[in-house]
Amino acid sequence: MSSPDLPLVAPQTAQPAPSGGSHQGTGKKQRVRRLSGRDRVAVVLMVAVPTLVVVGLVWLPAIASVLLSFTNWDGVGSLADVKVIGLQNYTDVFTNYPPFKPAVQHNLLWLVVMFVVATPLGVLFAVLIDKELKGSRFYQTALYLPVVLSLALVGFIWQLMYSRDQGLINAVLGTQVDFYGDPKWNIWAALFATCWKQVGYVMLLYLAGLKGVDASLKEAAQMDGANQVQTFFRIVFPVMRPINIIVLVITVIESLRAFDLVWVINQGRNGLELIATLVTANIVGEASRIGFGSALATIMLVISLVFISIYLWVVMREDER
Amino acid sequence: MSSTTIPGVGGRTLADTPRAPRRTPPARVVLYVFLIGASVLWLFPLLWALFNSFRDYSYTQANGYASFGGFTFSNYVNAWQQGDFGRHFLNSVIITVPSVVLALLLSSMVGFVVARFNFKFNLALLGLFTAANLLPPQALLIPLYRLFRAIEVPYWFSYSGTLLDSYWALIVVNTAFQTGFCAFVLSNYMKTLPYELYEAAQVDGLSVFKQYWKITLPLCRPALAALAVLEITWIYNEFFWATVLLQSGDKFPITSSLNNLKGQFFTDYNLLSAGSVLVALPVLVVFFALQKQFVSGLTLGATKG
């Protein structure tokens, strides 16, 4: 691979003076009118085929989930004899479904921990590694090694730490805590293992952002007598606003999607309830409550769409510049 | 968010003097200790798994895990045989390779059209793709599950007689999901290519498809390579869809097969360690061999490439 390095961050991401789109100064983009018939067919196909795949397998099922959430379908029998029951499923979710409340609480806790622990740690490591001290490569590699592992595998690797009888933590402390089994502990055990993976990811995103910050800005701030911390919080951090928003949105979405790790531990029961595992358990388990599970799925969908919109707004607006 | 207290490093003391002469200031020492400590802490769980995967079960039972000795290679042999790892690795390849190729092909087409032409719907199209990758997969589970169950296919096409519990289901779902992300990254990358290329190609009479195939794709090689590395890792690591869309254990890709084996591995942590190391090995090899692509792929997706 003797390819040129990929630009990690486009100049317009994190520089005070946007350098504008890449098409400025070149000819205007072509209108499709000037295309021959064959070319037109090619363009239509190149858009239509991928769009059909994505719409058919992602967006239509999402819409179907919303529609099904207003029905009482239990998955048996055909769709023809489905009764529409309005908001009944939602009422059930909120009023007489005991696991729902802990699941929401756990998802929120997940979000808070990712924000308050994993993100600041990732930012801190990024800033320190960005100083290019001796051994930066080693620290960077060590910290983001867990990023490449699957969350399911992270669950197994941490089992060697957490286990009650054979785990290292209990062996060292001389305790007998069943970190994965005890509902008092298991959410924290899962969160700790998730942070271990998440920190490297945040660090990487911020490292990319920091590389794009103009060095002259920092220098100017130092000349004006700002110390390092002031420089970071008043100059560097604000300039990285797009990255901040992206990390924020990704954190929210990932917290909402959290699934693999707790599913591996105990399928999201007994202190590890999450919205994602409730949806799955309502469908794949023996109790196939399709309408009810769809209501849960729709709740997830609505929350994530709010944040996806923010994300799109940020990245697309950069596009426009 | 700005009220983060930073443990272990007093930020105020880090007023570093540029190009300090040989003497390392005390603040620097603290910094190094902190970074090295963190790195060791981060590597430790993996190293611990590696360390115990080479040790004999009866030895660790007798002496506890916090001991040293009893080294053997037999855990790997046992894990490989009991877990039928050869088969599951093959499953992972069968699912991952077509998914990555298809996702890159479909997304590069969309990216090309968006970057090359000035359609009014470009932004909306890109939004449709990008957002698709960010939806929670659980929210699509029910319709897709029923859909795959309802589509009956001949037995030579899928042993189960439907698309459910077949490799096909996983390939199409992974493709659809990842196309969104790749389209976003590739369109950004393609927009950095000079437009004169296409004008020249137009003069030479190259058709639009040839422009995509002969000009754009070769120029996007670095981005395609970065994405391929990233996508291979992601789809190899994919757990949710594999768990819910497959039912027969022999079809599981390696990542979800470990969960299937939990029962057998549960009491023997040395075996579990060996299994974990085996599952982690391919991604770690990819990661170390292609670190640059991996990092640039990740950051391309989050920032503008």
Image: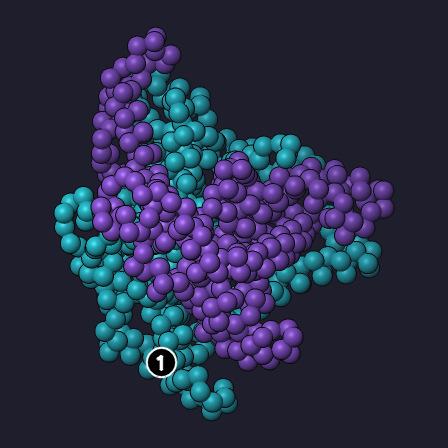
Q: Which residue is painted at 53% across and 37% down in the image?
A: B289
Up the image or down, B204 lies above or below B141; here it is: above
Residue B104: image x %, image y %? 62, 52
Rendered view: A76 above or below B130: below
Image x and y of residue B261, in percent: 39, 63
Chain in purple on the image: B
> Would residue B99 be visible to someone looking at this image?
no
Q: Which chain is cyan?
A: A
Residue that carries the numbered disc 1 in the rendered image: A287
Q: Residue A192 in the image: x percent, y percent?
A: 27, 49
Q: Give the number of callouts.
A: 1
Residue placed furthest toward the bottom: A81
State which quarter of the image contains the N terminus of chain A.
Answer: top right
Chain under callout 1 = A
Q: Type of residue at label 1?
A: Ala
Up-down: is B167 above or below A111?
Answer: below
Image point (28%, 51%), residue name: B58
Give the residue displayed 71% in from the left and 61% down from the top.
A45
Colouring rule applied to residues: by chain
Q: Is the residue marked by circle 1 packed among few (<14), some (14-19), or many (20+) residues within 10 Å? A: few
